[in-house]
Amino acid sequence: VDEYETVLVDFYADWCGPCQMLEPVVETMATETEAVVAKVDIDTNQPLAAEYGVQGVPMLLLFDDGQPVERLVGMQNEAQLRSVIEQYV
């Protein structure tokens, strides 16, 4: 988050159906926007998930200049996610 201007963090779990449905949308954002995408498995990174207040997955957290600026919980479609990211890139 400190190394890049805009970072989209995808908090997910392997057992989460909506997370699996969201994965192709997140991958598209990684290739088609200037945002860097990071994926965080909440089961193996519980302290990090707790630090950012993840209470349900999927949860996307958008950072701009090292600061969290948008929190999106639940399934997002590509147009919604692209619109949010493009406000910052």
Image (cartoon, rainbow, N blue to C red):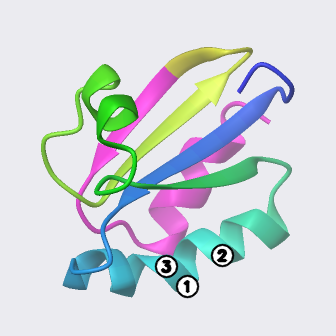
* Magenta residue check for 84: yes
Q: Secondary structure at mark 1?
A: helix
Q: Secondary structure at mark 2?
A: helix
Q: Secondary structure at mark 3?
A: helix
What amino acid type is highlighted by mark number 1? Pro
Cα–Cα gap, marks 2 and 1: 5 Å
Q: Residue at x 36, y 86 (%)?
A: 21
Q: Residue at x 57, y 69 (%)?
A: 26
What amino acid type is highlighted by mark number 2? Glu
Task: Magenta stretch: give its range.
Answer: 69-89
Q: Name the quarter where the C terminus is drawn.
A: top right
What amino acid type is highlighted by mark number 3? Glu
Say if 80 sits above or below 85 in the image.
below
Which mark, residue 63?
none
Q: Residue at x 61, y 58 (%)?
A: 82
Q: Which residue lies under the disc numbered 2?
A: 27
Say if 59 sits above or below 50 in the image.
below
Q: Is residue 13 left or right of residue 7?
A: left
Q: Which residue lies under the disc numbered 1?
A: 24
Label 2 close to label 1 by CB (< 8 Å): yes
Q: Which residue lies under the disc numbered 3?
A: 23
